[in-house]
Amino acid sequence: MQQLDFAVTVSALLGIPFPFGSIGRVNPELYALSAGTWDNQRTGINACTPQDDLVAWKMRYAEVLCVNSWQVKRYIDQYSGSSIIGFSAEYLHHVEELYSKAQANWSEVLKPTCPSETAKGEEFKESASSALQLQIDAYSSFLESFAKLARSAWTEFDLWLMGTGLLLMILSVITQAYILVRLNAVCQPSDQECPSSRIIPKLSFAFTLVTIRAASLLSNSYILAEGRVTNFLLATSCIAGVWSSATNGNFTIEEFIFLLLNIFARFGIELGMSKQIAGPTATKDHPVSIICDIFGSSFCNVSMDIFPIISLAMVTCIVLKLIAYAVHQRFLKYFIICGTILSYAFIANYWASESTLLSHTKAVQEIGRSLAPRFVYAIGGLSLVISVLWRLFAPVDSLKFNKRITSLSAAMLCSWSPTILMLLGRQGAFVALICITGAWCIIMLQQKYQKDSKLDITGSCVANPVSVTQWSLLAVCLFYLTGHW
């Protein structure tokens, strides 16, 4: 059975209206399976004599095709009237003629007739069966003709536009590679010029990763595995970085941590983490399912309840350290610290109230499930308002412009972070931990790259092309890690 016929066939078997946008035909083989559920009654073409099973099935199937064709005809009329492109007038006229002939024949078939006294019952049944078969063929011809017309109109691709898009994509990749090369050449000090043998491999590797990802977008099935492919490319860059640093004898812990980070991210993407995750729902050959088989399902369930709390505690420590380091205004610092601690405590209370590990009273569950999110949203909004008012009305301090921007940005980020974690669900803390750790690793690797190139970290605009590519791939992985598919 064709995929086009699936929706209308299931609708006919269930006895529900056909989908308006469906242009398929009810499959006769599957529809015949419902013949045993019909009531024996004399209807339709001959109400004078009993019908055998074949004539009764043909009558029911012709009635279903009549409704099927009527629904498709309504869709044709509405689409032709509202679409800018529409269908070819010649082919559309041919399809409408087929429908008109089928309807005219159907009117003749529905006329109640009884066999004469001289006519034999078998001959009458045979003629009735032939008439119904002709009617079924007429409706089938109409539906198949329009399906063929729709395929030719909707699956026709403009080769010129496709070629232009492919050319633009290739040119954009080449342009990015050229700009990266020029940036490294222009921003490099003349007396400390970095040898090309060190830059070209990094540019070539970054260019290869971007090219593979760009070429993957041409596949229709790529959208189903984009998160996995992106994580694979990111892990490949991490493995190449670890191997290169180990070979050169300057191995750094940041590269190894970034590689481990991708392994955890892959588990999250494979698991298809959602906001209401309750346990591993993977297939038998899934790595998470294998771990659950080894340690037991109870271990996995306990881990899924405890791991978000541990991740939240780690994120809390990082955020508090960020506030203490970046926010210099004393009142704003202590206010945001208190609000952050309360918000994360309410988030932990909210998750604990939904956990099955602890026994809670009904009042505690109601407070955790209904009041905790409201408190988190209220504290986040209040912190944001206080930050804005402080920026507008507070006295001008002696900090430099960059430090003031950093301080206010950190205050805004810490004000919104509890709300974002609440909206993301239990995987929110894990995603935030992946994002923070990944950003830290990329920044440290970028500083190491600038130090090895003997450049001034604060004044140089040279960026490691591999780090830029890794950050882009990490952002895509975070998108799929949050449950977007």
Image: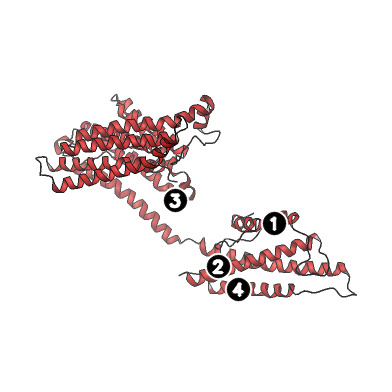
* Residue 173 relative to residue 188: left or right: right
Whether pointer 2 and pointer 3 mark residues with C-beta atoms closer than 8 Å, the reply is: no
Amino acid type of the residue that numbered disc 1 sits on in the rendered structure: Tyr
**Element at label 4:** helix
- Type of residue at label 2? Tyr
CA–CA distance in space, label 2 to label 1 = 23 Å
Q: Upstream in the sequence, badge 1 or badge 3?
A: 1
Q: CA distance from mark 4 to mark 2?
A: 12 Å
Query: Of marks 1 and 4, which one's residue comes earlier in the chain?
Result: 1
Mark found first going from the N terminus, 2 or 3: 2
For mark 2, what is the residue? 75
Indicate which label's residue lies in the foreground, 1 or 3: 1
* Of callouts 4 and 2, the N-terminal one: 2
- Image-quadrant location for residue 462: top left
The disc labelled 3 sits on which kind of residue?
A: Leu
Residue 301 on image: x %, y %: 48, 30
- Mark 4 Cα shell of 10 Å, populated few (<14), some (14-19), many (≥20): some
Callout 2: few (<14), some (14-19), or many (20+) C-alpha neighbours within 10 Å? Answer: some
> Which residue position holds label 4?
96
Name which residue type carries label 4. Answer: Glu
Q: Residue tagged by mark 3?
A: 218
Disc 3 crowd rating (10 Å Cα; few below 14, some 14-19, many 20+) is few
The dot on residue 84 is none
Q: Secondary structure at mark 1?
A: helix
**Residue at (74, 65) in percent of width and height:** 59
The quarter of the picture where residue 390 lies is top left
Q: Which residue is mark 1?
A: 31
In this rendered view, identify the residue nearer to me: 148 or 204. Answer: 148
